[in-house]
Structures are given as structure tokens and as C-alpha cells.
């Protein structure tokens, strides 16, 4: 199938998004159109984990800036190491959609043994566990941050696989092979081209100190999430809960979140600490419109991602 036809087919995968209605490619305008064009150009497809943010254009741009400048843009580290970090984080967060996507990316890069090990739950070498320059460590930490964020968002809005639900089981392996070849990562996009999508921010991230480009990207994204209309009650409860959390999954029970009487607070808490526990009832109970839901989930996911990265040992 020609790349253009595959791209058109992949745009239709946005119909698989749950709870919100993403802006279709043909109706995109302004900031949404600008992000969509960069996304297809540099990532190869209108990736649903990014495009689903489109009911809130600033959050859409922030999610793309993080993904592009961490995973896609050229830098000191290679795409293989970045994909391994993305896969390891996705596995730890119980996000089968992201594990499958980045397993396909590793396969396309000739690293099928790593992809298989990740899929089977076996240990693989962690690229962050070794001697790295400050700039390289910042790049890989940025990937970890991005996927702590995206795993949470994907768990709310997407199913367990990047393949459309209409693909029969007998054809899934073939479809994954075709998609993997189409998404074969290139040598890396020019850094910083997404930064113009967002105004400059002022927040400093200690883990990004060795890489000014990464620091700028995440500062801009942080300014977006910090400006969202999230109630003080939600902010206070989530920040208080995260302040004593060691990053370990709470398990399958959701009893730890039951004390939060407000369903919006409860949804934000579960997104932050156990996104795999989010279900239709939890989302429906919050009673939010598309933009409000994207922004609440985005804020909780970004806040939790920042906390998870703060738990990593920072080596100098």
C-alpha cells in the first residue's frame, strides 16, 4: 500500500478514541492544523495518542512538543535507546497499546530481541543505567517523562492495541508488520522546530539541566499544564497524594481512591497513580465535556510524570 494511502487510513483510526471526539484532519485549523502537519511529517502518522488531545489545542501542542523533542528529534542518543526507554516505561505502567507500538518500532530498527523481551516481561538493559553525558541523560529522561505522561492518557482514551478493532485476529500480525515498516524511524528530525507552537516557559527541570533544548521544550509544556483550569481541590489532593507515593502500582483494587467523594478528584487521582484502573464508569461519573476531560487527564498525567521522573537518580 502506498504511503499516502496508509496515512489516509491511519487518520481514520481516530475513530477508535474513547470518551472524546478528536478534531478530524480535514477540519483542523489554527494550532491544531499546525500540530497535525508536524505530527504527520516528523512522526509518520497522525498518531492517536497525540491527536486525541485536539479538543484542547494548547494541550495537543504540549503533548506533541514533549514527544517530538524527546523521541523524534536528533540528539546525542540514538532512536533505539529512546525506544527501549519508551517500551520499559510503558511496560511498567501496564500500557499494552504503547508497548505494542514501541515494540513494532524496535522491530523495525532490527532490535527484535529487545522487543520480545519487553513483551514477555523479561528484563532488558536500561539505557539510563550507565555512563552518559548530561545531555544524553537528559534526552533519555525526557523520553521517560513523556511516556509516563502518554501511558496515562492512552489508558484513558485508547484501547489495548494501536490496530483498529476491525482488524481480525488472523490478520493482526501481518498488519503489525506493514505498520512497523511504515513507521520505521528515520535519522531524527531537526531539534526545536516544534517549540514555536508554544510560548516560552519559566520552570526549571533539574534533570534537563544538561540539555537546553530539552529543558526549553518541557518548560513550555509545563507552562501549558500549569495554566489549565483545574480546581484547587483537585490540585491539592493529587499533589498531596503524590508527595508520599514511591511510584509503585497500587494494585488492582481502587479502594485507596474511594475516600475522594468528588468524582472529578477521584478520576484525577486514578489517572495519576493507577491509570490502568480507569474505566468507563469512572470517566462518566466525572461529567466533563471533551475539553475539560482532556485537560483534567492531561494535568493529572503531567503532574504524575513529573513526580515519577523526580524519583529517578540524577547522575552528574
Image (spheres, helix red, strand yellow):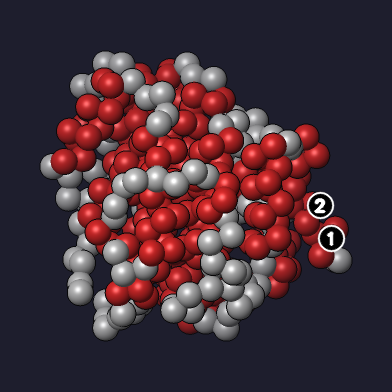
Kindly identify which residue carries mark 2.
8
Q: Quadrant of the N terminus?
A: bottom right
Q: Quadrant of residue 169?
A: bottom right
| Residue 126 percent coordinates (x, y) | 33, 75
Location of residue 194 in the rendering, given as x and y in whole percent from the top left corner:
57, 55
The answer to whether 230 appears left or right of 82 in the picture is left
Q: Secondary structure at mark 2?
A: helix
Q: Residue at x 21, y 22 (%)?
A: 259
Could you tell me which residue is drawn at 64 percent across and 75 percent down? 186
**Quadrant of the rendering where the C terminus is positioned:** bottom left
Residue 193 shows in the view: yes
Residue contact between numbered discs 2 and 1, judged by CB atoms under 8 Å = yes
Q: Residues within 10 Å of mark 1 (few under 14, many from 20)?
A: few
The residue at 57%/47% (across/down) is 197
Residue 262, x across and y down, in percent: 31, 16
Q: Is residue 273 above or below residue 71?
A: above
Badge number at residue 4: 1
> Which residue is located at x 52 percent, y 81 percent?
111
Q: Residues within 10 Å of mark 2 (few under 14, many from 20)?
A: few
Residue 232, x across and y down, in percent = 28, 21
**Of residues 248 and 66, which is closer to you in this image?**
66
Amino acid at each position: 500500500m502506498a504511503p499516502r494511502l496508509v496515512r489516509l487510513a491511519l487518520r481514520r483510526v481516530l475513530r477508535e478514541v474513547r470518551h472524546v471526539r478528536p478534531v478530524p484532519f480535514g477540519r483542523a485549523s489554527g494550532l491544531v492544523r499546525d500540530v497535525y502537519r508536524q505530527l504527520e511529517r516528523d512522526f509518520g502518522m497522525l498518531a492517536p495518542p497525540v491527536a486525541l488531545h485536539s479538543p484542547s489545542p494548547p494541550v495537543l501542542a504540549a503533548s506533541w512538543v514533549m514527544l517530538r523533542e524527546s523521541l523524534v528529534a536528533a540528539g546525542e542518543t540514538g532512536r533505539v535507546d529512546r525506544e527501549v526507554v519508551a517500551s520499559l516505561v510503558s511496560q511498567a505502567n501496564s500500557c499494552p497499546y504503547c508497548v505494542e507500538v514501541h515494540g513494532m518500532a524496535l522491530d523495525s530498527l532490527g532490535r527484535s530481541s529487545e522487543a520480545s523481551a519487553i513483551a514477555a516481561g523479561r528484563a532488558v538493559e536500561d539505557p539510563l543505567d550507565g555512563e552518559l553525558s548530561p545531555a544524553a541523560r537528559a534526552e533519555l529522561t525526557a523520553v521517560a517523562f513523556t511516556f509516563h505522561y502518554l501511558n496515562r492518557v492512552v489508558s484513558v482514551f485508547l484501547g489495548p492495541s494501536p490496530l483498529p478493532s476491525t482488524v481480525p485476529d488472523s490478520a493482526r500480525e501481518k498488519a503489525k508488520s506493514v505498520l512497523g515498516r511504515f513507521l520505521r524511524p528515520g535519522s531524527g528530525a531537526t531539534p526545536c522546530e516544534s517549540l514555536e507552537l508554544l510560548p516560552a516557559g519559566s520552570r526549571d527541570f533539574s534533570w534537563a539541566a544538561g540539555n537546553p533544548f530539552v529543558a526549553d521544550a518541557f518548560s513550555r509544556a509545563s507552562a501549558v499544564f500549569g495554566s489549565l483550569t483545574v480546581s484547587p481541590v483537585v490540585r491539592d489532593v493529587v499533589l498531596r497524594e503524590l508527595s508520599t507515593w514511591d511510584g509503585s502500582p497500587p494494585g488492582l483494587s481502587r479502594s485507596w481512591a474511594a475516600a475522594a467523594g468528588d468524582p472529578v478528584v477521584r478520576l484525577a487521582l486514578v489517572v495519576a497513580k493507577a491509570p490502568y484502573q480507569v474505566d468507563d464508569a469512572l470517566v462518566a461519573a466525572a461529567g466533563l465535556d471533551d475539553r475539560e476531560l482532556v485537560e483534567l487527564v492531561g494535568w493529572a498525567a503531567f503532574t504524575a510524570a513529573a513526580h515519577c521522573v523526580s524519583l529517578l537518580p540524577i547522575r552528574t
